[in-house]
């Protein structure tokens, strides 16, 4: 059955959602977590086998009622069988109506048909069988350590014989009935209780044995008949056992013939697996070394020729401290220049007359000094003469006053002398005054000439001669000239520093191959670039040297490894690894052939001699079966006659039962014995029937399990890259490693145990595909797989998809794209 379309009406987070599957073999669904991948898997399972909204222990019966509380819940699945018949399975559930499994309608070619029309084609399997066999998810991958041979056989029984599911139920029913009749350590089952009653009643019978002669005789006859019947039954049992053994041998004849054919295919192969793995390792190492060689050579070629570092560049870098010193000195010079400029402005502001002579040289200043000293001072001479005249006048007046005072105060002589002296002094002062007036008159003629000289001085120097402080002005001029000299010196220093900087910039530009601006910051940055360029050049040189050294070492190791591989190939007597690999394939084929032969030998070993005899004379074997059947019929007639006689004796014994108490006790004992025998016969019958049915199922399915085991081993070898090559399924699951070591599943890594689970389940699916071919659902089961394991399981799934439809749901975009060029994509909330 191939699934071609899904139609979701309402289920979980999906409503009115339809998906058509473009590929009948393999389809990949891609979606992030919570996008609804697991919901789609549950939808497929529950549409097929029911919603089971009530609590249920099986997987995938979770409650997927629509999130939006809409109705009805469910949808439809569309299938196509090998005869190109179209099937539609629609299952819907309306809250409060009908069974919680939902109402199922099956259509074939658009016509409503009974459900069994579809389910008969898949052997009427149930949801548990489908989940265990065809669905892979993380929860189920964790059950690998619980897989037993009996579990796998139970599933294979579904397919081994007609109505095998009913036979399994029947076998279980017989086994249950037998267990209800007798248990070894039980007290409640009927046979256990009868055994106890027999012991009690035998004691009662022994006490009154002398009183029970008549009943004893009848009992003796009854016993004889019973023993005779037991003898008949034993003969019948032996005949039936012999007949069953012959039937079993008849069923083993195809396997025996297959064994003979396989033995004819055995060929000797001279192959050492360990040496092959050594050669494989060397070949892989050679490939890696060759790839590394090409990579190293490519990187060396990319580096090209590394230019040598000019000594001049290294020397220029050594001038960085000098550049920093120049920058510092230049900054200091600028600060000093600014300070001197401010001092000059301050000096000129304090002495305004200084602006008039600020640019005078020394000679001009000397001329100024001489011209100033030559100027006459009219005001100074006139004021001196007048001051002296005023002084003599005041003195004369004082003496007259003093003389009069002395003359009046009886000091006439002394007072008279003072008066005379005062008169003479005033007269002299008057004379001097007249002479000065004459001198002034004479000097008046020269006043205009003197003013003219002062005016000429002012016009020449712009300085007022009457207010000029020549000494202070000259002192300020000398101070100003000293500041100008200092400023000129500083400017010269600045020019020299800039020149050095510019020279260094030119050198850097030449070595850097790019122009450099004439400023300290740009030159400093250029030095950093030059240093980085030198560092890169040194780094490239070192890298290239290392690569060349690695290339030499790689080439040496490559040559040694080639020599070792050639030695291994010579010892193995092959020309190359391809021929060696062909030998390995042939060896694996022969190994697989031997495994099949050993498996058949193990199964047939006790009967090989008889099978050989039977195949040589099949007619005699057929005649023997016919004869046994006739003897069995005869024995059954004798048993029937014996039972009739025993029944007659029982009737007689029943008439004697009420005659005496003793006989009554013996009758009770006989009844108990009869019950015990009947129940024992029923117990043995049920137990034998259960064993016979199991044996029949084993015979009917005996070829599927060995083939499934061989396929599982092949799949495990593929998935683990031959690391594990054998599987042992008993009470505990185990695998054999390539070195022969047996490892229990609980000691495997999570990824390897999941690979083993995939191998077993996919091998089982491969074996039952002729009877049941349903879609395989894989829900994000590769999260524990690394890239290599994912690649290997991808190869296996592509192989399985050739015979079974595979639907993969994953959150890994790369895996989805690898499995299907255009994967089916749905996003969260669809």
Image (cartoon, grey):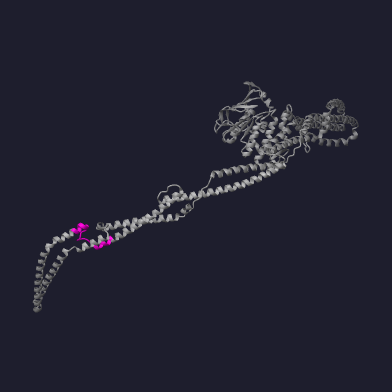
Q: Where on the picture, by quarter, is residue 486?
A: bottom left
Q: Is residue 51 visible?
A: no
Q: Where on the picture, by quarter, is residue 176?
A: top right
Question: Residue placed farthest to the top in the image?
Answer: 111
Position of 511 compared to 257: left or right? Answer: left
Q: Position of residue 726 (x, y in %)?
A: 72, 38
The part of the chain drawn in magenta is 456-477
Position of 403 compared to 496: left or right? Answer: left
Residue nearer the viewer, 525 or 347: 525
Q: Where on the picture, by quarter, is residue 28?
A: top right
Residue nearer the viewer, 332 or 401: 332
Q: Is residue 36 above or below residue 451?
A: above
Q: Is residue 521 above or below residue 452?
A: above
Q: Position of residue 56 (x, y in %)?
A: 64, 33
Q: Which corner quadrant holds the C terminus?
A: top right
Q: Is residue 583 visible?
A: yes
**Total numbered circles:** 0
Residue nearer the viewer, 155 or 333: 333
Q: Position of residue 426 (x, y in %)?
A: 9, 71
Queried whether the magenta region covers residue 148, the answer comes back as no
Residue nearer the viewer, 745 or 530: 530
* Predominant secondary structure, magenta span: helix
């Amino acid at each position: 059955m191939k699934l071609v379309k899904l139609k979701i009406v309402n289920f979980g987070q999906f409503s009115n959602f339809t998906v058509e599957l473009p590929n009948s073999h393999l389809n990949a669904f891609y979606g992030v977590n919570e996008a609804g991948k697991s919901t789609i898997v549950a939808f497929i399972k529950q549409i097929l086998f029911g919603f089971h909204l009530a609590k249920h222990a099986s997987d995938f019966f979770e409650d997927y009622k629509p999130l939006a509380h809409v109705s009805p819940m469910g949808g439809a699945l569309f299938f196509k069988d090998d005869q190109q018949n179209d099937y539609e399975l629609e299952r819907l559930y309306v809250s409060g109506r009908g069974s919680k499994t939902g109402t199922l309608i099956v259509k074939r070619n658009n016509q409503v048909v009974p459900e069994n029309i579809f389910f008969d084609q898949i052997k009427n399997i149930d949801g548990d069988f489908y989940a265990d066999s065809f669905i892979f998810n993380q929860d189920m991958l964790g059950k690998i350590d619980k897989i037993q041979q009996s579990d796998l056989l139970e599933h294979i029984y579904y397919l081994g014989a007609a109505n095998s599911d009913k036979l399994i139920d029947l076998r279980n029913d017989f086994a249950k009935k037998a267990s209800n009749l007798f248990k070894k350590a039980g007290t409640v089952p009927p046979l256990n209780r009868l055994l106890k009653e027999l012991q009690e009643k035998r004691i009662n019978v022994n006490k009154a044995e002398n009183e029970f002669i008549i009943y004893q005789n009848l009992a003796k006859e009854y016993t004889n008949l019973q023993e005779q019947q037991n003898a008949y039954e034993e003969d019948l049992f032996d005949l039936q056992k012999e007949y069953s053994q012959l039937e079993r041998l008849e069923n083993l004849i195809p396997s025996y013939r297959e064994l003979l054919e396989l033995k004819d295919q055995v060929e000797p192969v001279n192959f050492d697996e360990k040496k092959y793995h050594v050669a494989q390792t060397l070949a892989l190492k050679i490939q890696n070394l060759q790839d590394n060689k090409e990579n190293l050579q490519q990187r060396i070629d990319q580096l090209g020729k590394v230019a040598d570092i000019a000594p001049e560049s290294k020397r220029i870098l050594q001038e960085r401290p000098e550049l920093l010193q120049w920058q510092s000195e230049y900054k200091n010079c600028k600060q000093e220049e600014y300070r001197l400029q401010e001092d000059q402005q301050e000096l000129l502001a304090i002495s305004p007359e200084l602006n008039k002579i600020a640019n005078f040289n020394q000679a001009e200043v000397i001329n100024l000094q001489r011209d100033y000293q030559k100027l006459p001072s009219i005001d100074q001479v006139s004021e001196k003469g007048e001051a002296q005249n005023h002084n003599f006048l005041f003195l004369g007046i004082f003496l007259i006053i003093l003389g009069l005072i002395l003359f009046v105060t009886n000091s006439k002589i002394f007072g008279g002398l003072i008066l005379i002296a005062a008169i003479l002094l005033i007269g002299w002062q008057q004379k001097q005054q007249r002479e000065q007036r004459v001198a002034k008159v004479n000097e008046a003629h020269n006043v205009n000439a003197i003013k003219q000289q002062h005016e000429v001085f002012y016009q020449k120097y712009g300085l007022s001669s009457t207010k000029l402080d020549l000494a202070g002005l000259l002192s300020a001029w000398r101070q100003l000239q000293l500041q100008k000299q200092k400023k000129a010196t500083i400017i010269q220093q600045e020019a020299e520093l800039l020149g050095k900087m510019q020279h260094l910039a030119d050198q850097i530009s030449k070595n850097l191959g790019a122009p450099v601006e004439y400023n300290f910051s740009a030159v400093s940055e250029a030095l950093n670039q030059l240093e980085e360029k030198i560092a890169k050049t040194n780094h490239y040189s070192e890298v290239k040297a290392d690569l060349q050294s690695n290339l030499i070492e790689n080439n040496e190791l490559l040559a040694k490894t080639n020599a070792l591989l050639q030695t291994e190939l010579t010892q193995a007597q092959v020309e190359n690894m391809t021929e060696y690999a062909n030998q390995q394939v042939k060896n694996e084929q022969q190994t697989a052939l031997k495994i099949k032969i050993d498996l058949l030998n193990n199964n047939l070993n006790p009967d090989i001699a008889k099978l050989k005899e039977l195949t040589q004379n099949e007619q005699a074997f057929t005649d023997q079966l016919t004869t046994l059947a006739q003897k069995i019929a005869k024995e059954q007639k004798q048993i029937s006659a014996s039972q009739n006689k025993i029944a007659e004796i029982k009737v007689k014994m029943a008439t004697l039962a009420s005659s005496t108490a003793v006989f009554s006790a013996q009758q009770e004992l006989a009844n108990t014995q009869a019950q015990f025998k009947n129940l024992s016969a029923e117990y043995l019958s049920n137990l034998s029937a259960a064993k016979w049915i199991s044996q029949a199922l084993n015979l009917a399915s005996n070829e599927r399990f060995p083939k499934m085991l061989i396929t599982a081993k092949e799949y495990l070898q593929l998935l683990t890259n031959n690391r594990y090559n054998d599987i042992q399924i008993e009470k505990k699951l185990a695998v054999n490693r390539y070195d022969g070591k047996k490892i229990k599943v609980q000691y495997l890594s999570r990824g390897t145990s999941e690979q083993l689970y995939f191998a077993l389940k996919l091998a089982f699916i491969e074996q039952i595909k002729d009877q049941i071919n349903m879609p395989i659902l894989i829900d994000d089961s590769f999260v524990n797989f690394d890239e290599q394991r994912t690649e290997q399981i991808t190869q296996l799934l592509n192989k399985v998809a050739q015979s079974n439809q595979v639907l993969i749901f994953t959150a890994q975009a790369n895996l989805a794209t690898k499995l299907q060029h255009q994967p089916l994509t749905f996003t969260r909330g669809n």
